[in-house]
Image (cartoon, rainbow, N blue to C red):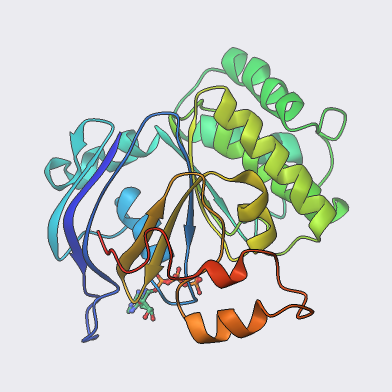
């Protein structure tokens, strides 16, 4: 579904690669967390999948297509297979909930009839029926993120990319958003989510890919958040009475130190 082969990305004007020799495969139907400190390369990974950036070297295949072989004219067609959600929602402020979700479909030329079935369907999926006429500023943060998810979903994408979708939300609201993403995944959509939220990663026990300085340092199925970025610090946090989650001292076990 998604395959990176020795992918390196060096942004213009920078010396250090944002991603460095990354090879991995994500299978259809997986739920994957991308974790790692700020600046480790998570958003770069997502932008490469979307073909918003192109790799400096290496190759990327998404849904059977070699991204290097897709012409810029064909990129919008390719992106129809992908839904994207961001930390800051990115809704159109002057459009209603309905119009925000419908906009994606209008841009790609879907008929009015299709839009009037698909939009309410997507809004029902995210639990926002009855709020079609509201504007973004009339919604809570959690509701705004649900609109963003409905917009990402409405075209029934094979892959959903989420860049810190709970970053601006309180824990209870975040939990609701995660329940929704899990449901979307259970219906067959591959979900890849970059996050700093340890509680969420620990609770869901899905595949965890950890990036440090542009390299994958851990790729673990059924993993937790515990990062390998600073084992000494992590071990201190794991001391009894420190309030850290149990297992915090297990850094260095299992797949530690096995960059892939
Ligand atoms: N457009 C750009 N031009 C130059 N450097 C960039 C650009 N975008 C990202 N970088 C650099 O690439 C590295 C990886 O950035 P990236 O945004 O992928 O990290 P991240 O893990 O998503 O961080 P965060 O958790 O803060 O979102 C960083 O050093 C960043 O400064």
Q: Percent x, y for residue 65? A: 20, 34
Instruction: Residue at 50% x, 23% y: name it.
Output: 188
Would you place residue 140 above or below residue 256 in this image?
Answer: above
Look at the image and tell me in which quarter the C terminus lies.
bottom left
Q: Pick the residue in front: 70 or 210.
A: 210
Would you place residue 206 above or below residue 159 in this image?
Answer: below
Would you place residue 186 above or below residue 233 in this image?
Answer: above
Q: Pick the residue in front: 233 or 1.
A: 233
Please indicate whether residue 155 sits to the left or right of residue 177 in the image: left
Please indicate whether residue 14 sits to the left or right of residue 106 in the image: left
Residue 183's image quarter?
top right
Instruction: Residue at 51% x, 86% y: name it.
Output: 232
Q: Percent x, y for residue 142? A: 79, 51
Q: Pick the residue in front: 86 or 99.
A: 86
Q: Percent x, y for residue 1? A: 30, 33
Please indicate whether residue 178 sits to the left or right of residue 222 in the image: right
Q: Pick the residue in front: 48 or 249.
A: 249
Dividing the image into four equal quarters, which quarter contains ligand 1?
A: bottom left
Residue 19's image quarter?
bottom left
Observer able to see residue 231: yes
Instruction: Residue at 37% x, 54% y: name it.
Output: 219
């Amino acid at each position: 579904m998604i395959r990176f082969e020795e992918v390196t990305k060096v942004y213009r004007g920078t010396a250090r690669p944002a991603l460095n020799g990354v090879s991995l495969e994500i299978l259809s139907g997986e739920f994957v967390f991308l974790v790692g400190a700020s600046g480790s390369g998570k958003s770069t990974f997502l932008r490469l999948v979307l073909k918003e950036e192109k790799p400096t070297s290496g190759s990327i295949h998404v849904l059977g297509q070699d991204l290097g072989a897709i012409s810029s004219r064909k990129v919008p067609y390719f992106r129809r297979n992908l839904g994207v959600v961001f930390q800051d929602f990115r809704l159109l402020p002057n459009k209603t909930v309905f119009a925000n979700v419908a906009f994606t479909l209008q841009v790609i030329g879907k008929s009015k009839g299709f839009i009037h079935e698909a939009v309410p369907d997507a809004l029902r999926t995210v639990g926002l029926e009855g709020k079609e006429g509201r504007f973004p500023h009339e919604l809570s943060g959690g509701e705004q993120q649900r609109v963003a998810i409905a917009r990402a979903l409405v075209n029934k994408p094979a892959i959903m990319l989420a860049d810190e979708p709970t970053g601006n939300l309180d824990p209870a609201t975040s939990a609701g958003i995660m329940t929704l993403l899990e449901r979307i995944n259970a219906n067959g959509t591959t979900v890849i989510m970059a996050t700093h939220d340890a509680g969420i990663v620990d609770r869901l026990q899905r595949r965890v890919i950890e990036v440090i300085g542009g390299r994958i340092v851990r790729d673990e199925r059924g993993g937790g958040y515990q990062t390998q970025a600073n084992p000494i610090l992590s071990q201190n946090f794991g001391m009894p009475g420190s309030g850290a989650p149990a297992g915090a001292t297990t850094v260095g076990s299992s797949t530690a130190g096995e960059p892939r």
